[in-house]
Amino acid sequence: MSQEDDIEAIPEPEGASEVIDTDYEIGQDNITPKIGPFGLDIHNPVFAISGIVVVAFVILTLMFQNSVGPAFGAMRGFLTSTFDWFFLSAANVFVIVCLGILVSPLGKVRIGGVDATPDYSYLGWFAMLFAAGMGIGLMFFGVLEPVYYFGTPWGDNPLGGDLGIVEGVLADPETVETARRLAMASTIYHWGLHPWAIYAIVALSLALFAYNKGLPLTVRSIFYPIFGERIWGWPGHIIDILAVFATIFGLSTSLGLGAQQASAGLGFVLDMPELGTSITTSLVLIAIITGMALISVLRGLDGGVKILSEINMGLALLLMVFVLLVGPTLILLGNVLGNIGAYFSEVVALSNPVGREDDGFRQGWTAFYWAWWISWSPFVGMFIARVSRGRTVREFITCVLIIPTLASAIWMTTFGGTAIQQLIENASEAAVFGYVIDAYVPELSLFGMLSELPLAGITSVLAIILVIVFFVTSSDSGSLVIDTITAGGKINAPVSQRVFWVIFEGLVAASLLLGGGLAALQAASVSTGLPFAIVLLLACYALIRGLMSEPR
Amino acid sequence: MYRKVIFPVDLSHIDHLTKALATAADLAKHYDAEICYVGVTGTAPAPGAHSPAEYADKLAAFAAEQGSKHGVNATSKACTSPDPSIDTDKTLMTAITELGGDLVVMQTHAPSALDYIWAGHGDTIAAHADVSVFLVR
């Protein structure tokens, strides 16, 4: 948006949105130290404490990893098995709130005030929010999850339904079809409306309180209707520090685990298993990903992050269309609508929080996923908020909730459907059977599926590149988010700060990979899901109140 | 010789701009040119402005004040950028072309070793703009 005023223009009252009246000046708690030639502009307690806590946490985890690992693992298990009903209920609330806002008159509110215009085209906007939101998970779970539900020997099949393959022998065709349908519905459930509703609530709240209410673009601002002026003090500092903490650990652990997956894939493609398990390969990959993320943040949102997200989406589309064409095309095409239908017919049973007996699925998968999405929500939500100015709430929910759900459903149908078809045709001879059901090697499940399609060498390399680019797009957007939070909501902080966070993130990932403790910290970051779930329920209330006070 | 002077301005550093502002005003008076004060703001709330609209109003007020103080014809143009840390130079370059400016006057900071890695805004504009650029130290 730009606007030209001539000399007679008298400062007009605030634009057509209800700016919150507060004495807080954005940046008033910031300090601007100079380190050598580098000037900084950082929020005083938030930057220092997050930096120190992250370093201390990494050191402690490395020193005591033998005791810390099981402790965090146990905590995660305790939380997901004790509070599964809470996670499931909370996610249902988020979906209902989002759909309610979508169809209500509140959908007419425009983010940034009635005159705001969007900063990005639909394509660039969607590419960025999709790449930040779940890109990498689609690569990892696209084959793994449907196949797992279809034939899990560990008893965590969704809704306790019948399995399609038992001890390497296919069930009768009717059971196979039922199992396939349920496997696809359950996978789409975990990648559909619920996770995106979690992101949408956070993103919409942040966007509303920053762009319409004039509060700084930082997580604490959501809580203004609840805590009032106190959010500028310690309650707010703690919320922001937690958000930084969740973001950097979520990103670093995923970066570390992702580098291991990509190197396993490299070892598989080059037929050199020792390369795949070597830590050096993973470290080199982390260095490459960090380097690419660095270039991306230095080129900025427009010249770096957006372009990379678009390349990313192009490559992903290419891979998907290829699998669709060389895989069982007609079966897949026939199944797209069927799977979406299966999702809608099973979603009530799958999201029912009480009175179920499929503990392994509900607690081990659903509750874990919900905690995971929630722990990522400050990061993804803040990033989506940053790029969504100028959209109406209805456009926003359509593009953040409805379209990603459809995209995930099509992706899962293509990758999972092809893999299940391989199982149906080859049973225990299928490569995916070996990696998912027989011996559990999840990082190779995608490559196993690709290996039985034509041009496996090329598509596997494409898949590895995609994994890497997906990580770069998460890493660069995550660094921008951390930089904004630790600068007290300023988006024009000195460039050296974002460079610091990108490098710091790579270093945390590398040291965790070298010292062990990646899985422990991932368990820890997932554990932040419970307090954040409560926080998000409060945010729903703040969001609806905030939207109701806006002009429509 | 000049008809429109473009003066890129950072509203949070007005007190450091006295010399450059006076230079621009003198040049404008001499050539009977108009001055357009151009500011780039982020789309998110920033110190001093809760929204781009508020920023535009403040910039217009600043231009009016400068215009009456120096007795020149002053206008303003507020530009927005989703990532001002990176895109300020690019946004300014576009504004210079769009506004049809034929002289840019801007304040620069004292040179330092860091300029070899990240050039200052003035350096970049001087290096890439099609029009004359007057950098004031």
Image: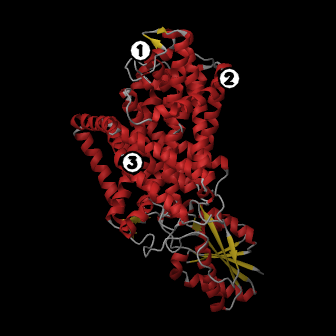
Specify which label sits upstream in the sequence, 3 or 1.
Answer: 1
Would residue A386 appear left or right of A522 to someone viewing this image? right
The numbered mark 2 sits on a residue in which chain?
A
Instruction: Tell me whether marks 3 and 2 sit on the same chain.
Output: yes
Compared to residue B128, the image places residue B67 above or below, namely below
Query: Could you classify mark 1 by the number of other residues whose Cα lies within 10 Å: few (under 14), some (14-19), or many (20 or more)?
Result: some
Q: Between A76 and A439, which is closer to the camera in this rendering? A: A76
Disc assigned to residue A438: 1
> x and y percent of residue A214 in the render?
51, 68
> x and y percent of residue A286 in the render?
44, 39
For mark 2, what is the residue?
Answer: A325
- Identify the residue at image location x=66%, y=49%: A122
The numbered mark 3 sits on a residue in which chain?
A
Q: Amino acid at mark 3?
A: Ala
Which secondary structure lies at badge 1? helix
Specify which label sits upstream in the sequence, 2 or 1.
Answer: 2
> x and y percent of residue A30 in the render?
40, 68
Task: Measure how far apart labels 2 and 1 are at the Cα level.
Answer: 28 Å
The numbered mark 1 sits on a residue in which chain?
A
For mark 3, what is the residue?
Answer: A533
Compared to residue A180, the image places residue A283 above or below, namely below
Task: Measure how far apart labels 3 and 1 are at the Cα level.
Answer: 36 Å
Nearer the observer, disc 3 or disc 1? 3
Q: Amino acid at mark 2?
A: Leu
Instruction: Tell me whether marks 2 and 1 sit on the same chain.
Output: yes
Res B85 quadrant in image? bottom right
